[in-house]
Image (cartoon, rainbow, N blue to C red):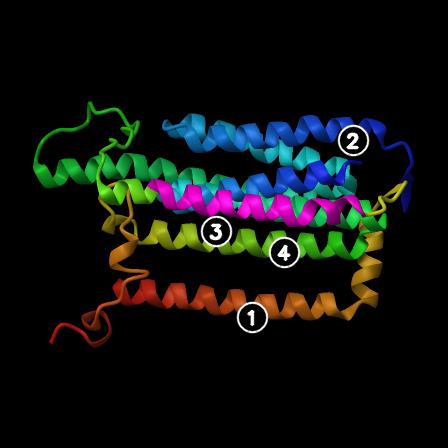
Amino acid sequence: MNITFIFFSSSLLFLIGVFASLLFKNISRIIISLQFIFTAAIINFLGFSQILYGTSIWAVTFILIAVITIFLFQYMIIFYLKSNFYQYKTDKLDFSSSLYYFRINDWLGDE
Amino acid sequence: MMEVKNLMIIQYLQYIILAAVLTFSILSLICIKSSRKFIFLFFFFLFAGFFYFTIGFMELTFLLAVPTMLFAGSFYLFELKKEIFSVKNISEESGEDFSAVSFDYEPEKFSYKKGMLLRYIIPVLFCSGIIFLFAKLNISFIKSFKIADKMTITTISDMAKEVFTNYIILIIIFVILIFMLVIWSVTIINNRRKG
């Protein structure tokens, strides 16, 4: 098996994910690009453990746990977005006003 | 544990599968219409599953497929509702009837502003810098690896043995469970306050 090809293709997939998550503002595209980053990590982890050492029971167990956990986490993100759905009028979310940019009124209130 | 010694066919399969994974990943990002986007995302997940299958997961791929399918289903439902309600909200606010409007998104209009250019240039520079560093620093290191001549296939019984002997996995599960519980409870509290 060609480890160089696996390494470079997974790193390319990771970079596609990073590029898309930096570029797009649409929330569904950001979630899809997070999937690419996540899949690239699994491919790299599995490829290295299987090709270099031949046995990968620990790696397989760890990956199963990690996959279930991260998908649960992503499911929570979607649940959160879905439950706050009526706040968003279009398909674009403005992160600059809520998540990364804090004003003093957000902490202390308007009065 | 089973061992596979002839790895030539698997190597050629991996070339095809990883190329398909990369192609479908780009296609699912580029597509504007969300139904096509989800079709390509499905193919991306399918070929990623094929890759796990060839690299030694074998029947455990189906275990990985269960959370993936659950997540993809919930994501699709979210996208579907968003398409319908986004049009509905606009029509309620403006008082006009938008029921004839198609649910496909319009592509983002390109304008040559300073902020827009920076928005495109910064990710390109960032990613090209990372891939340059990857290629320059890692290629000689990777070529020095001695690749194993046989591949081992893990079964569920091996995993059960590993869980019962290696307690670090149980500790990791416990820590992860606490972490997820905290995030879940924070989400629920936030929603209840709003309600």
Q: Nearer the viewer, mark 1 or mark 4?
A: 4
Q: Which mark is residue A75?
A: 3
Residue A7 locus on image (x, y percent): 68, 42
In the picture, measured across the screen, residue B81 lies left or right of residue A18, that is left
Q: Nearer the viewer, mark 3 or mark 4?
A: 4
Q: Which residue is mark 4?
A: A66
Left or right: where B150 falls relative to B87: right
Please name the amino acid that badge 4 sits on.
Ala
* Pointer 1 chain: B
- Mark 1 to mark 2 CA distance (whole Å): 40 Å
Question: Disc 3 residue type?
Answer: Tyr
Residue B172 visible, this angle: yes
Location of residue B150 with respect to B108 vertically, above or below: below
Membership of B131 in magenta stretch: yes
Q: Amino acid at mark 1?
A: Ile
Residue A10 coordinates in the image, percent (x, y): 62, 41
Between residue B31 and residue B86, name the one nearer to us.
Answer: B31
Q: Which residue is mark 1?
A: B178
Residue visible at 80% across and 44% down in the picture: A51
Q: CA distance from mark 3 to mark 4?
A: 14 Å
Mark 1–mark 4 distance (CA, rounded to whole Å): 14 Å
Q: Chain of mark 2?
A: B
The magenta stretch spans which residues? Answer: B120-144
Task: Give percent across and percent down for residue B77.
Answer: 41, 39
- Let me know if marks 2 and 4 both belong to one chain: no
Q: Which residue is mark 2?
A: B11
Label 1 vs label 3: CA separation? Answer: 17 Å
- Displayed quadrant of residue B51: top right
Label 1 SS: helix
Disc 2 or disc 4, which is closer to the eye?
Answer: 2
Label 2 sits on a secondary structure element that is: helix
